[in-house]
Image (cartoon, rainbow, N blue to C red):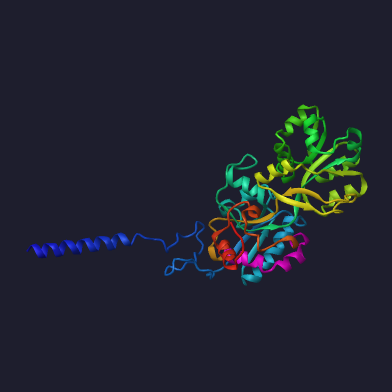
Amino acid sequence: MKKVFALILTLAMVLSLAACGGGDSGSQSAPPADGGSQSGDAGSGTQSTEISGSVDLTFAAQEVGTAAYNYAAAIQTAIVKEIPGANISITTTSPGGVGAPIIVNGGAQCDIVMSNSAPAKWSMEEGILGNGPTPDICAIAGGLGHDFVNVMFTQKFVDATGITTVEDLVAQKYPVKLVIKTNGTFGELAAEKVFEALGVTLEDVASWGGVVEKTGGDAIKSGLQDDLYDMTIDHIGAGQANTSELCLTHDMYDVQLGEETMKKMVEMGYDYVTVDANTWNGQTEEIKTVGSQQVILVPTNLDYAVAYHMAKAVCENKDDLASAVAAMSYFDPATAGTLTLTGVPLHPGAAAYYEEMGYAHG
């Protein structure tokens, strides 16, 4: 009788352990929050890169003719080439590099968006423009472009004051007349970050008796041409129309940021950038500065296989992208997955592609 009881007890323990083992979901994935398909390989514990079902995505850009729209159109073509039959619909609902992380959050309003790496980082970690953090964003690829923080004085201001650096300006608390882009733009944020690196704010500039005017690009150009302002700060790329015209029609002084200032801005999320000589009329020497490049952002719940093929599409169509948008000639797939260029972590599907290719990532 005792042997029978022991046998029954042993069987019960075996059944109990088997039931507990069923709770191990290491090879299973929860369905994506948007209800889309989830590609997975339950047998190996790895996710499949085979796409199942249709691919319908919304790509938010700015209005037709803007850099963001041109980037989106070129990337759309590359994705469709990689994923035949994919429907990538471009909208003009993005406010640009600053607001894009907020739009893409959770995929509520779009599935893909162009941003810049630094504001993507700020948005994810602490929130920007009065909005809370946006943790549910990730990247497909970064380093698409060659934009930079551009600081200029008018030559008239330099001749009158002898001030040639922002560091000197701040040390003297000089009542400068500064004109920058409007609230909510990356140009405005760039100006704020330059002064933040020097331990002051735009409000401090005004308190010295200076002027801080925020307006559009055309008004900035004409105001500097007429010497209504002394300086400007923006985040732009080579060939930007207003700055090119300004330098052709008015004597401007290209400002070199100090090493310590640039170091602090890199710690904020920027990266070092060199502006080649003759980028602007009258600029005979290269300028060392910092910048934040274009990055493709998606919500974290984007399908794994789709993210993998998006990364592959961008990296393996580099020449086509450069032909469509000249600034994309700076794009390097070998570094496109690094955190310095993305600002936020890679989507796991994109990370799998970079890992497969042996490219640096994370």
Quadrant into which the C terminus falls: bottom right
In depth, the one of 249 and 132 nearer the eye is 249
**Above-or-below relation of 233 to 170:** below
Quadrant into which the N terminus falls: bottom left
Is 92 on the left-hand or right-hand side of 308?
right
Q: Which residues are magenta?
A: 307-328
Q: How many marks?
A: 0
Farthest residue, direction bottom: 84
Most frequent secondary structure within the magenta stretch: helix
In depth, the one of 222 and 86 nearer the eye is 222
Q: Residue at x 79, y 37 (%)?
A: 166
Question: Residue 92 appears at what percent x and percent y?
Answer: 70, 55
Question: Residue 123 appears at what percent x and percent y?
Answer: 61, 46
Is 307 on the left-hand or right-hand side of 42?
right
Quarter of the view holding residue 253: top right
Quarter of the view holding residue 3: bottom left
| Residue 317 lies in the magenta stretch | yes
Farthest residue, direction front: 259
Is 23 on the left-hand or right-hand side of 245?
left
Question: Residue 17 appears at what percent x and percent y?
Answer: 27, 61
Question: Residue 354 appears at what percent x and percent y?
Answer: 59, 64
In depth, the one of 283 and 36 nearer the eye is 283
Q: Residue at x 83, y 51 (%)?
A: 286
Farthest residue, direction left: 1
| Residue 176 lies in the magenta stretch | no
